[in-house]
Image (spheres, grey):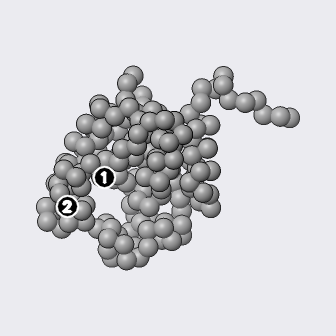
Amino acid sequence: MTGPVVVLVGPMGVGKSTVGAILAERLGVTCRDTDQDIVEQAGKPISEIFLDEGEPHFRELERAAVRRALAEHTGVLALGGGAVLAEETRELLAGHPVVFLEMGVTEAVKRVGLDAPRPLLVINPRQQWRKLMEERRPLYTEVARAVVSTEDRTPDEVADEILAALQPPSTQPEKQQ
């Protein structure tokens, strides 16, 4: 199967773009972020798309951006936090090397902040984030070949674990007893 060498999924603020850039550099490929594709296509930030056209329109743009990126991109691909909500997207991800980057709510609040322009976290960010994760965690794990925590780890440490997780079993070093 052609397509990305790795696809990163997970909640907003988990570090998909940062870790993606490190992975791309290490693998000698480019990194693409579907949220950035949407911003470039729409000519405005995602928060404005939500306000001006609504979430359904944004999700339509997101599905199209993911479809295009999976077909065209051969490097590291970072998907927006809600991309896995679409059944079409989950089906397209089948067979791709997908890694779910996860973190807990305390870490999310530290990273995302309470005043960041995140349209889905405007009211009661902690509660909203928990609700989003209850809905999305099963979908992230459904599409993922590996799950990697970003809690209390540097982006380089996360990238190391992703690279190790994606190696075929025969090339992984044996554990010492």
Q: Is residue 59 visible?
A: no
Q: Is residue 119 above or below residue 25?
A: below
Horizontal side, residue 75 vs residue 160: left or right: left
Q: Is residue 149 above or below residue 169?
A: below
Instruction: Give the residue type at disc 1.
Output: Asp
In terms of secondary structure, where does tag 2 sit?
A: loop
Q: Residue at x 51, y 71 (%)?
A: 110
Horizontal side, residue 46 vs residue 141: left or right: left
Where residue 69 sits, quadrant-wise, is top left
* Residue 138: percent from left, percent from top: 44, 48
Q: Residues within 10 Å of mark 1 (few under 14, many from 20)?
A: many
Determine the CA span between mark 1 and mark 2. 11 Å
Q: Residue at x 19, y 50 (%)?
A: 41
The residue most toward the left is 53
Q: Is residue 117 visible?
A: yes
* Residue 93: percent from left, percent from top: 37, 35
* Residue 7: percent from left, percent from top: 43, 40
Residue occupied by mark 2: 44
Q: Nearer the viewer, residue 44 or 174?
A: 44
Q: Residue at x 19, y 61 (%)?
A: 44
Where residue 106 sits, quadrant-wise, is bottom right
Q: Nearer the viewer, residue 155 or 151?
A: 155
Q: Is residue 51 above or below residue 140?
A: below
In terms of secondary structure, where does tag 1 sit?
A: helix
Residues at marks 1 and 2 touching, judged by CB atoms closer than 8 Å? no
Is tag 1's residue or tag 2's residue first in the polypeptide sequence? 1
Q: Nearer the viewer, residue 68 or 98?
A: 68
Instruction: Give the residue type at disc 2.
Output: Lys
* Residue 139: percent from left, percent from top: 41, 46
Q: Residues within 10 Å of mark 2 (few under 14, many from 20)?
A: few
Residue occupied by mark 1: 35
Q: Residue at x 44, y 73 (%)?
A: 113
